[in-house]
Image (cartoon, rainbow, N blue to C red):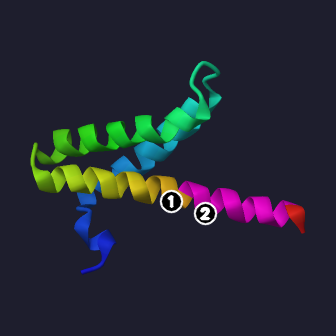
Amino acid sequence: MEMIEFIPESLFILVVATSILGVFLKKVECIKDNFIPIILLGFAILFSMALEGASPTSFLQGIITWGVAVGLHQTVHQISKDQNNI
């Protein structure tokens, strides 16, 4: 079973919401960058459990959703950073 299969379709919007929240938090000056991933993790877990019900499975789905959102953001960030250095 692939990891993406573990995320139900109803939580794909949570990946997008987590990414958007991350962009918003980056612009808030009073929040240090090193706290943003922790805030996003809490957000993803809480909303996953709110949407899917409180269970160990929804807790893990929140972590995976957070990982996908942060991983995609970092991949795009690093690729664009490398393109600017060429």
| Residue wearing tag 2 | 75
Residue 77: image location, x then y, percent: 67, 56
Above or below for 84 versus 62 = below
Q: Can residue 24 be seen in this view?
A: no
Does the magenta segment cover residue 80?
yes
For the residue carrying disc 1, how many other residues have a C-alpha within 10 Å: few (<14), some (14-19), or many (20+)?
few
Q: Is the magenta stretch mostly helix, strand or loop?
A: helix
Residue extending farthest to the top is: 30
Does the magenta segment cover residue 72?
no
**Which residue is drawn at the image coordinates 49% and 53% (left, top)?**
70
> Could you say which quadrant of the image residue 25 lies in?
top right
Above or below for 71 versus 34 = below
**Residue 9 placement, left or right of 29:** left
Q: Is residue 53 visible?
A: yes
Residue 74: image location, x then y, percent: 59, 57
Residue extending farthest to the front is: 34
| Residue wearing tag 1 | 71
Q: Quadrant of the C terminus?
A: bottom right
Foreground residue among 10 and 69: 69
| Residues under numbered marks 1 and 2 in contact, where contact means CB atoms less than 8 Å apart | yes
For the residue carrying disc 2, how many other residues have a C-alpha within 10 Å: few (<14), some (14-19), or many (20+)?
few
Foreground residue among 43 and 15: 43
As shown in the figure, which amino acid type bears the numbered disc 2? Thr
Residue 9: image location, x then y, percent: 26, 61
The residue range painted magenta reads 73-84
**Which residue is drawn at the image coordinates 31% and 52% (left, top)?**
63
